[in-house]
Amino acid sequence: MHIADITMFYAPTSGGVRTYLTQKQAYLATQSGIRHSLLVPGKSAARRGDVHTLPAPPIGRTGYQLPLRGKRWTQTLCELQPDLIEAGDPYRLAWAALAAGQRLGVPVFGFYHSDLPRLLENRFGGAARRLGERYVRRLYTRFTEVLAPSRVMARNLNALGVERVTVQPLGVDTRTFHPDRADASLRRRLGVAADARLLVFAGRAAREKNIPLLIDAARALGAGYHLLLIGPGMPRSDAANVTVLDCFMPSDVLAGTLAACDALIHAGCNETFGLVVLEAMASGLPVIGMRAGALPELVVPGTGVLTTDLSRDGLVEATRTLFSLDPKAIGRHARRRVEERYAWEQTLAGLVGHYRRVLGQDGAQRAGASHAGP
C-alpha cells in the first residue's frame, strides 16, 4: 500500500498539520507493506527520502508557500503512483490531488484540518462565510472520503451537505510530552514567584486564538497568577504578570516548558481539534478553556474546567475554580486520558484502518466519484 500526502501546510515553523504528517511518516515507516510519500512546497524541485518538493511563491512572512498552478503537482503525484492520496489543505493542491486520483483511478481523501468558512467570516464577515461554505461543499463532496479531526467538524461538514465524513483525531507523542520533562529552571528564568500559579498557552497568534482575551484575564486574575504566552507573532503586553516568548519553540523544549507550568489556558472558541491541549494534558497539566469548538471532546470532566461564559470573566472564574480544587490530581487524570486514547500509535493505527477499509472496497471504483475541478 502506497500512501501519498499533499499539502501546502508544511513550513519549518508550522503547527498541527506538519506535526501530524511528521508523526504519520514515522509511524508508517514501521508498518510492514506500507510506503509513504509526501509532496509539499519547497525552494526547488527536489527529493529528500520520501519527501518531494516543488517550488511555490511564499505568502508574506508566514513561512507558507502557495502553489498557483496545479498541473505540475498533479503530474508529480501521478509519477509517484500511489494507491491512495490524501489532501491536507482546501486550496490548489486539493484540486491537484483530485485530478491525480481521477487520472490514476485511486481513492482521494481530504483531511479537513481548518474551518475555512469560519476563518473567512472572522476576517471578512458573513458574506465571505457563505462563499466559503459553498466552496467547501463544492470541493469536499468530490473526495472519496473526508477526514475530520473532531465530531464538531464532522457535524459542520454534514450540515454543508458533505456526507462521507469520518472522524479521525490527531494524537500526541506521550514520550516527549511527559510530566517528567519539566524544566526545573523555568520559573527562575521568568522571574515568577514559587507560589504563583503559572498559566501557559502556546500556538499561533491567530485571531481565532483570542490572545488579547488571555492577557485581559491575566490582568484580572492579578499577581497570584502569571501567564506565559509562547509562539511566533505573539502580541506584547505591559501587564506585569504576563511573559511573552515571541518565537517558535521546538517540541522537546516546549515539552519541558509545558510540564513546568501549572495549567494550560485556552481562549479559542472555534478550535477544530486543539493539539496543544493534548500536549499539555500529556505533560500532566489540567486545562482551562471555553466550552466551545472541539475542546469539550478533549477536556472531559475531571481533566480541566471549561466555561460556557465565553468572555474574560468566564476564563477568570474557570481559572479560580480549577485552583480551588486539586489541579495536580486533575493533571494526572488528564495524562491518563491521553495515554488511553490519544497516543499517536493509537490514532494512526485507526487512520491506517480507514485506508485499508477503502482500498479493500475496490478503491478504483470508489475513486470514480472524485472529479477534478478548476
Image (cartoon, rainbow, N blue to C red):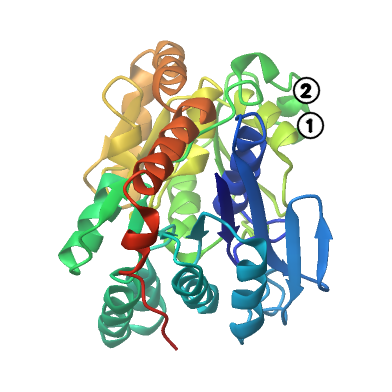
Q: Position of residue 11 (x, y in %)?
A: 70, 61
Q: For the N terminus, which image quadrant?
A: top right
Q: Decide which of 113, 287 is in the foreground and name it.
A: 113
- Picture quadrant where residue 178 is located: top right
Q: Position of residue 355 (x, y in %)?
A: 42, 44
Q: Residue at x 68, y 74 (%)?
A: 65
Relative side of 184 to 67, left or right: right
Going by the numbered disc 1, the residue's amino acid type is: Arg
Q: For the C terminus, which image quadrant?
A: bottom left
Q: Position of residue 334 (x, y in %)?
A: 42, 20
Q: Decide which of 203, 34 is in the foreground and name it.
A: 34
Q: Decide which of 266, 235 is in the foreground and name it.
A: 266
Q: Is residue 277 above or below residue 82?
A: above
Q: Is disc 2 in contact with disc 1, using a CB cutoff of under 8 Å?
A: yes
Number of numbered discs visible in the structure rendering:
2
Q: Residue at x 45, y 72 (%)?
A: 98
Q: Which mark is residue 189?
A: 1
Q: Position of residue 268 (x, y in %)?
A: 39, 52
Label 2 neighbour load within 10 Å: few <14, some 14-19, many 20+: few
Relative side of 233 to 166, left or right: right
Q: Which mark is residue 15?
A: none
Which residue is tagged 2? Answer: 185
Q: Residue at x 60, y 35 (%)?
A: 33
Q: Is residue 159 above or below residue 195?
A: below
Q: Decide which of 108, 67 is in the foreground and name it.
A: 108
Look at the image and tell me whether residue 242 can be seen.
no
Going by the numbered disc 2, the residue's amino acid type is: Ser
